[in-house]
Image (cartoon, helix red, strand yellow):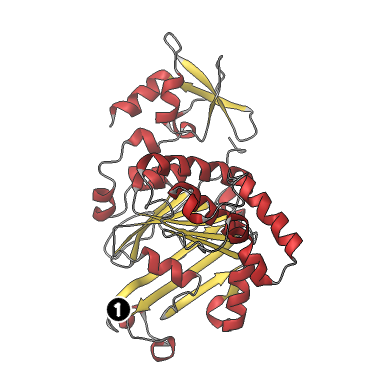
Amino acid sequence: MAKLRARGGGVRRAPGKTGRRVDPAGARHDGPAARVEEKLVCRGDWKIDGADRGRLAGMSAGELSKAGPAAVRDASLSIRAGEIFVIMGLSGSGKSTLVRCLSRLIEPSAGEILFNGENLLTASAARMIEIRRRSMGMVFQHFALLPHLDVLRNVAFPLEIQGQARARREARARRMIELVGLAGKEEFYPRQLSGGQQQRVGIARSLAVEPELWFLDEPFSALDPLIRREMQDEFVRLQSVLKKTIVFITHDFDEAIRLADRIAVMKDGAIEQIGTPEEIVLSPATAYVREFTRAVTKAKVVRVASIMKHGRAAGKSVAATASVAEAAPLFSPGVGSLPVAGASGEIVGRLERADVVAVMMEG
């Protein structure tokens, strides 16, 4: 099991609540996760209406909480290289404001934000423009495609802003268009594309700059359910190829479960809990998280790796990272166990039908 992909997480201890203790950024310091590179770290981030950092400098968390209405309250998290980190909560929970603070599209009122160890809050405006152009990709709910440019030129546009030669930027744009499944649509204009196709163009455009860090703010929420599911599948496929560090915002728990390595649940500007989908659903840290996840089917979040047993079995293998709900249909009549495959395809254990049924029965 040592070769399985690390899916560690942690729980912030809310005031007056109990839970597993972690560092302020929500990262564990034991096992393989301790050796994973931290790409983006946020410590004690606040966004208080009408307040700037200069006036609030040196204030304690208690003092900051009284300084005015806050859209983000003492938020701390650590995002690891190559993971999909989902920030979720209801409308008005502060998730979009937090992500804009992480990229300094909105100026935080207090706190510290480190990207590859560099404190973004001390970076000049020119430096931030450079970081966003070359190291960060962003996709939002509204596609914001340029209507007078065709697909090829829309995707190549950020490279044109960088000053890249036309041949080079168009070659890169064509590769990204093919990657998102739109080869042959290069000369189409946005008005000639479906909503799902337009979102693919937006994704291709954000990937054209080869970002180290990719922000996606409810990118699929404007799509109808069928196209949204297809885009989620496409997103999973892209991540399996690109292995980007991704911060993904959603209010849809099913979407979060499908996509996330770890999830941060927000309420009223504060982070209630950080953990894997399993930890969030099976071990909620607060009453709010418990209520928020109450209707989630456990079989969707419990991973095969969590219930598999030692030993081997015959038949087609199931991935250790698959959910129990995904594994259940693989049991044909008369089959009592299946082999479990690790990240490299090696057999790491066996999955028993009885254990799958037990999880399914829990609801």
The reply, left or right, for residue 174 in relation to residue 282 is right
**Front residue (pair 236, 195):** 195
| Identity of the residue drawn at 36% across and 48% down | 280
> Where residue 187 appears, x then y in whole percent?
61, 52
Q: Which class describes the residues within 10 Å of circle 1: few (<14), some (14-19), or many (20+)?
A: some
**Residue at far bottom of view:** 55
Location of the C terminus (image quadrant): top left
**Front residue (pair 184, 137):** 184
- Where residue 274 sits, quadrant-wise, is bottom left
> Where residue 50 appears, x then y in whole percent?
33, 85
| Identity of the residue drawn at 36% across and 86% down | 51
> Where residue 61 appears, x then y in whole percent?
35, 78
Q: Secondary structure at mark 1?
A: loop
- Where residue 54 sits, quadrant-wise, is bottom left
The reply, left or right, for residue 11 in relation to residue 35 is left
- Where residue 254 sits, quadrant-wise, is top left
| Identity of the residue drawn at 32% across and 53% down | 285
**Front residue (pair 358, 123):** 123
Number of marks in the image? 1
Seen in the picture, residue 92 relative to 11 is either above or below; the reply is below
For disc 1, the marked residue is 65
| Identity of the residue drawn at 66% across and 68% down | 160
**Front residue (pair 193, 182):** 193
Please, what is the three-letter code of the amino acid marked with disc 1?
Ser
Q: Examine the rendering and report whether any part of residue 28 can be seen.
A: no
Q: Examine the rendering and report whether any part of residue 108 can be seen.
A: yes
Location of the N terminus (image quadrant): top right
> Where residue 316 appears, x then y in whole percent?
55, 18
